Image (cartoon, rainbow, N blue to C red):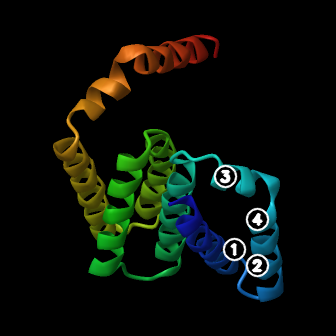
Amino acid sequence: MNILCIPFSILLFYQTTLLLNQKHQKYALFASFVYGVSIGTIKVVLFLRMYTVMQLWCLLALYLHLRMIREEKLRLRDYVLLGVSALLGAMTHYYFLAFLFILALCFGIYLLKNRRFRETIGYCITMAGAAITAVAIYPAMLKHIFSGYRGDETINNLKGGLSSI
């Protein structure tokens, strides 16, 4: 599975860097090459766990959010792709949810700041739909995230980090 995901990850990395810097296609190509042959990417591919798949969903979510910033009006296709990537990312690994939360928070603020209220509502509905679907598919997800040794550890770390501020 990892071998199948990495070419798509490299392609999404290329598309994302190209979206960020449209004038310099050579730089996007070079950055994608370095990303593809880096020791980190090679180790993630060889380490047979879910991280390559999660990396793919993170890159897809980032690419979709950046593309939606560039577009004047969001289409149904954008919402569907975003909902699918959010659902698949949540089903792959819970760490994806932390990434998506920060990304969604920033994007929601961007939409509200630019007075794109209709898109904000559609975006919230899409994210809520993905979350509800993920919990419907795997209800134990909530228990794993908010309780158990990992959930308790995370909540205690958050409390400890927030109390030191």
- Disc 3 from disc 2: Cα separation: 25 Å
From the viewer's perspective, is the residue at label 4 or at label 1 nearer?
Answer: 4
Q: CA distance from mark 4 to mark 1?
A: 11 Å
Residue at 57% x, 47% y is 48
Q: Residue at x 34, y 23 (%)?
A: 146
Q: Which residue is mark 2?
A: 28
Q: Are marks 2 and 4 in contact (CB under 8 Å)?
A: no
Residue position for label 4? 35
Q: Is residue 46 left or right of residue 122?
A: right
The residue type indicated by label 3 comes to Leu
Work out whether residue 82 or residue 149 is closer to the camera in this orientation and state it. 149
Residue at numbered disc 3: 46
Under tag 1, what secondary structure? Answer: helix
At label 4, the amino acid type is Tyr
Q: Are marks 2 and 1 in contact (CB under 8 Å)?
A: yes
- Closest to the camera, between mark 1 and mark 3, is 3
Spatial separation of the CA atoms under disc 2 and disc 4: 10 Å
Spot occupied by residue 73 in the image (x, y as percentages of width and height): 37, 81
The count of marks equals 4
Disc 1 marks which residue?
A: 17
Kind of residue at badge 1 = Thr
Whole-angstrom CA distance, mark 4 to mark 3, is 15 Å
Tag 3's secondary structure? Answer: helix
Q: Amino acid at mark 2?
A: Ala
